[in-house]
């Protein structure tokens, strides 16, 4: 195997990236693609790479999944810097963020049901904005002043999202008391000082909302880069729900090579015979983010 000379890389001392899985089951091929891409991007920029467990939705969690995810990352040579952040332990900070927004009159209580919103076309129209509902049995919505729907993606270029959806006063805390993904993820990206987020294309649309929330909170937003999704033959996103096959932690090399090929890279034939760390080193030195393919099918 020939390892080419290290190409000169731009030193970005501020780079802080992260991988943020939810523990609704073990990692599968698609989530490993995202983990590896965000890890490599961080390391190519001499960055710090963090792991955050997004365990804010207890009914969707699977017992033991968090530890299994961490074991999987280690087995595949994706070693994180600094301690793992668990969203389930951050409630106080999420409440502080909500209180800040409330004090600035940037949130309000909403009692609409899903059926009521659906009956009005599926996008929430601000019906409760001036109703002064009590907090009991209410969701908390953001007063959306910015409605960001366009941004520059590091990998996909210019992104334009649905304008009507971008205008929505989206939910920050659900009626059932759980924090919304948008709130938790932005509050944590601020707390962890995240500068770059590399993740799957299924999050192109939520990124616009998150940019709106960063702006509302008057915090600098990270740069986002979205990579192609692993989909099944029928075009469905590969996920825990459609029973993506489990990863083999005892023999990670073939899967790592498959991930690199999925990302449009051409690893040398004998790389599969090398150690996990050698494969990761090859990936850091050779993966080109400029040649990522569009959405890819994989055989289950
Ligand atoms: Zn409402």
Image (cartoon, grey):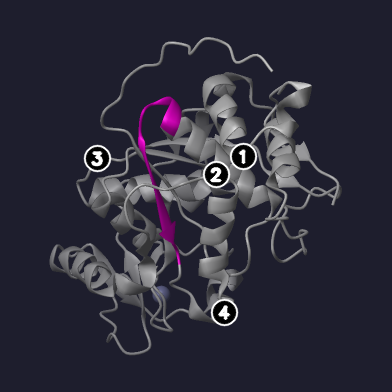
- Report how far apart the C-alphas of labels 2 and 3 lie in the structure: 31 Å
Do the residues bearing badges 3 and 4 touch, measured as CB atoms within 8 Å?
Answer: no
SS for callout 3: loop
Q: Residue at x 55, y 52 (%)?
A: 73
Please check the rendered image and state whether residue 47 is part of the magenta-colored stretch, yes or no: yes
Do the residues bearing badges 2 and 3 touch, measured as CB atoms within 8 Å?
Answer: no
Find residue 50 and report its horizontal and vertical position in percent. Answer: 38, 48
Q: Residue at x 67, y 43 (%)?
A: 229
Residue 9 visible in the displayed image: yes
Residue 200 visible in the displayed image: no
Q: Which of the numbered marks, if any, corresponds to residue 63?
A: 4
Find residue 223 and report its horizontal and vertical position in percent. Answer: 38, 34
Nearer the observer: mark 3 or 1; the answer is 1
Looking at the image, residue 260 sits to the left or right of residue 98; the answer is right
Mark 2 or mark 3: whose residue is earlier in sequence: 2
Front-most of residues 83 and 95: 83
Q: Which residue is mark 1?
A: 276
Label 3 CB less than 8 angstroms from ligand 1: no
Mark 4 or mark 1: whose residue is earlier in sequence: 4
- Report how far apart the C-alphas of labels 3 and 1 lie in the structure: 36 Å
Front-most of residues 218 and 201: 201
Mark 1 or mark 2: whose residue is earlier in sequence: 2
Splitting the image into 4 quarters, where does residue 77 fall?
top right
Q: Which of the numbered marks, if any, corresponds to residue 77?
A: 2
Do the residues bearing badges 1 and 2 touch, measured as CB atoms within 8 Å?
Answer: yes
């Amino acid at each position: 195997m020939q390892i080419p000379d290290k190409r000169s890389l731009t030193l970005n001392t501020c780079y802080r990236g992260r991988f943020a899985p939810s523990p609704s089951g073990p990692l599968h091929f698609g989530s490993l693609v995202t983990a590896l891409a965000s890890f490599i991007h961080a390391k190519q920029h001499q960055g710090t790479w963090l792991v955050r467990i997004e365990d804010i939705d207890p009914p969707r969690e699977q017992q033991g999944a968090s530890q299994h995810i961490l074991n999987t990352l280690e087995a595949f040579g994706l070693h994180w810097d600094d301690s793992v952040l668990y969203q389930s332990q951050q409630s106080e900070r999420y409440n502080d963020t909500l209180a800040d927004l409330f004090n600035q009159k940037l949130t309000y209580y909403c009692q609409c049901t899903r059926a009521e919103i659906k009956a009005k076309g599926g996008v929430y129209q601000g019906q409760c904005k001036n109703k002064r509902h009590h907090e009991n049995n209410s969701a908390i919505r953001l007063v959306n002043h910015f409605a960001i729907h366009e941004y520059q993606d590091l990998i996909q270029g210019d992104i334009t999202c649905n304008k009507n959806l971008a205008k929505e006063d989206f939910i920050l805390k659900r009626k059932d008391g759980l924090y919304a993904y948008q709130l938790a993820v932005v509050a944590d990206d601020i707390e962890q000082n995240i500068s770059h987020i590399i993740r799957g294309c299924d999050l192109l649309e939520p990124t616009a909302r998150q940019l709106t929330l960063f702006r509302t909170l008057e915090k600098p937003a990270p740069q986002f880069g979205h990579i192609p999704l692993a989909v099944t033959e029928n075009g469905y996103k590969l996920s825990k729900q459609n029973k993506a096959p489990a990863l083999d932690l005892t023999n990670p090399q073939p899967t790592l090579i498959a991930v690199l090929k999925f990302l449009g890279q051409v690893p040398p034939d004998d790389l599969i015979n090398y150690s996990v760390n050698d494969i990761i080193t090859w990936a850091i030195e050779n993966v080109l983010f400029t040649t990522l393919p569009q959405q890819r099918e994989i055989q289950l």
